[in-house]
Amino acid sequence: MKKAPQAVVVGIGQPHAGDDAVGIQVARTLAAEGFTTCECEDATRVLELLSDGERVVVIDALVGGVVGAVVHVHPDALKTEVPPVSSHGLSLAQAIGLARTLYGEDILTRLDIVGVGIDRPRAGAHGLSHAVRKAVAPAAELVRRLASHRHHHADVARWA
Amino acid sequence: MSTRTITVENLARVEGEGALTLVMEQGRVTQAKLRLFEPPRLFEAVLQGRSCLETPDLTARICGICPVAYQMSACHAVEDALGVKVGGALRELRRLLYCGEWIESHVLHMVLLHAPDFLGVPDVMALAKVAPERVKGALAIKKAGNAIVATLGGREIHPVNARVGGWHRVPAKAELEALLPALRAARAEAEQTLDWVAGFDFPAFERDYELVSLKHPREYPMNEGRLVSTSGLDLDVREYRSHFVEEQVDHSTALHSRIIGRGGYQCGPLARLVNNFELLTPGALAAARRVGLDPSCRNPFRMLVVRGVETIYALDEALRIIGSYAPPEAPSVPVTMKAGTGQAITEAPRGLLYHRYVLDEAGLVRAAQITPPTSQNQRTIEEDLFALGGALAAMPLEAATRYAEHAIRNYDPCISCSTHFLTLRKEPGE
């Protein structure tokens, strides 16, 4: 059986906003292992990668859940009521919504989203809180597994 | 008396936090205030005491859409103070970096932000359903522009490779040539995008603007040139403060600029095109003529089309620069600190960006002035809304609100930072 190509790992976050940087930290962990990664402050790059036919695993901070929880998120679970686009970039929900409209629902077979629960971003803060820092290793493990193997969302289990 | 007030609490699809209040009485606008309430960011004060060599990277942080413009104006102004001349391939690479920013900024605004106004849809999500190929094309063009900035600048947003005196590192010829396929594809896509936007319905609205831009004897202006206007200004950029003044107004955290003794003016794509029409590349010139643009244009709604022509120009120019590129012997020229005052204006996608620095003997910034294009256009935007008063007064509230926002977005105002939903409030007549 032909091995599926490794996915691009996209870490979304703001390095100077406290726990919002957790996606960046996970991406850097995997970059050190040789994964193809990119770091972004918004999700425009996700749209570009999907339009290029790449398989993508997004790792981002999640507000509103259990702090430090690692969650495999189905794209439909993202907030669908998206605001008008800003010229500063796209939210993840916007990027995925645009990709679905422009390239069809099939793009979902090339997309996984992993979230790490945080309390809230903190402007000007550097470094992760203790609870979120502890989540970096399990989040990296999940992203590593997803990036290495093709799967379908029907197989997705909720992680916590 | 019939009084109607339109309040847009947060302007969407513009850069940053702003709002609009229009008061209409007896079928005319009696008050138009573009309220920019984003807190002052005090960059000019932050720069004081810092090395002049830091100004390109510090000021780039003012904007995530046009960081190149801030870097370029800072570099040129500091070099003016220090007596540094940057030429040859180093200068060409700066122009190439600017091409990348013009491409990605213009196409983002044209298609993702402004086209929805013309097609009567709320945003790009809805636009993607009615014109998916155009949105795909715009994303491809934007990506090509971003690739230039990433290759030359080290990353797409807030690039880090430009410096006073040139560059930290210059690319190999092969690195730039790798950009060519995407740029050529974007060039073809840009023609289609231009023809698409040129087919929109444009309000029959014109004003006798004083259009101010740079003008260079041999090239469509980006980094250098004299400051000229359609009313006869022809200045060295060092004379800027003798002819232009910034003023505080009570409803905005941004200063309003005006020409001393004259008033408001317009800078940006339309001003550049009108003052430099003959300096477009042959391909961009032909495209402009095909869509009916010429130096007589004074319709701000057609700035959308002008951006399309400038996108083609920037792609042509990028292809030319890459084609003729030969890496320089050194990535920068020597820079020696000394006391002095330097000024520069470059053409940000949205218009003139003025920087002025006073340096001490060690090259530390003692005073800084940064005048961005949006503050220069702010008075003119308000004057446009006054002039549109009759049409706005005749419209239902929702349509008038949309139309007023549409008119503001002609200027692609860059207030900076976040964008929000609109909240409308209608006050009863008094």
Image: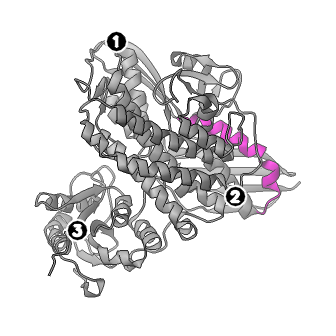
Residue type pointed to by label 3: Ala
Viewer-proximal residue among B157 and B93: B93
Q: Is residue B342 left or right of residue A155?
A: right
Element on which disc 1 rests? loop
Q: Which residue is mark 2?
A: B401
Residue type pointed to by label 2: Thr
Chain identity of mark 3: A
Q: Which residue is mark 1?
A: B339
Magenta-highlighted residues: B373-396
Q: Image point 41% across, 42% down: which residue?
A: B100
Q: Is residue A131 visible?
A: yes
Chain identity of mark 1: B
Q: CA distance from mark 3 to mark 2?
A: 45 Å
Q: Is residue B352 left or right of residue B392?
A: left
| Residue A7 circle label | 3
> Which badge, 2 or 1, is on the more N-terminal residue?
1
Q: Is residue B251 visible?
A: no
Q: Image point 43% across, 25% down: which residue?
A: B368
Q: Is residue B395 magenta?
A: yes
